Amino acid sequence: MDHDSHSLEWQERKQDVLQGYNDYRETGNIIKNKDWSNVPIEQVVIKDRCWIEFNASILKGLQLVTTQ
């Protein structure tokens, strides 16, 4: 899965800052009550015959394709 952890629009994420602060003070978990409804989340798909090296990082926004 891939996501940006927050919306790019300040109006959509301004409550996250206060909620995260309060959650961290109470529980030590900054995302306990995070509102994920404005966070775009997409599936990461790695298709057959794709070569991934050791110590590789699969980053968001990449489309892995193969050639035959």
Image (spheres, helix red, strand yellow):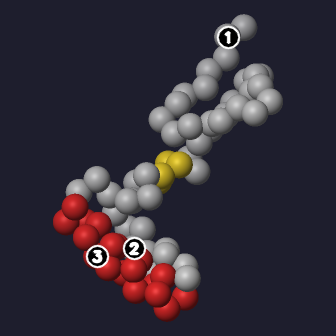
Nearer-the-camera pick, 18 or 59: 18
- Compared with 55, 35 (above or below) is below
Sequence-wise, which precedes: disc 3 or disc 2? 3
The residue type indicated by label 2 comes to Asp
- Mark nearer the viewer, 3 or 2: 3
Which residue does the image show at 25% across and 70% down from the upper left?
14
Which residue is identified by label 1?
A: 67
Apparent side of residue 32 relative to residue 52 in the rendered image (left or right): left
Look at the numbered discs 3 and 2 and tell me whether their residues touch, using CB distance below 8 Å. yes
Q: In which quarter of the image is residue 13?
A: bottom left
CA–CA distance between discs 3 and 1? 46 Å
Residue at image mark 3: 15
Residue 65: x %, y % from top left: 62, 21
User: Where in the figure is residue 53, as x and y percent of width and height?
Assistant: 77, 25
The residue most toward the bottom is 26
Please tell me how crowded label 3 is: few (under 14), some (14-19), or many (20+) other residues with Cα within 10 Å.
Answer: few
**Residue hosting label 2:** 35
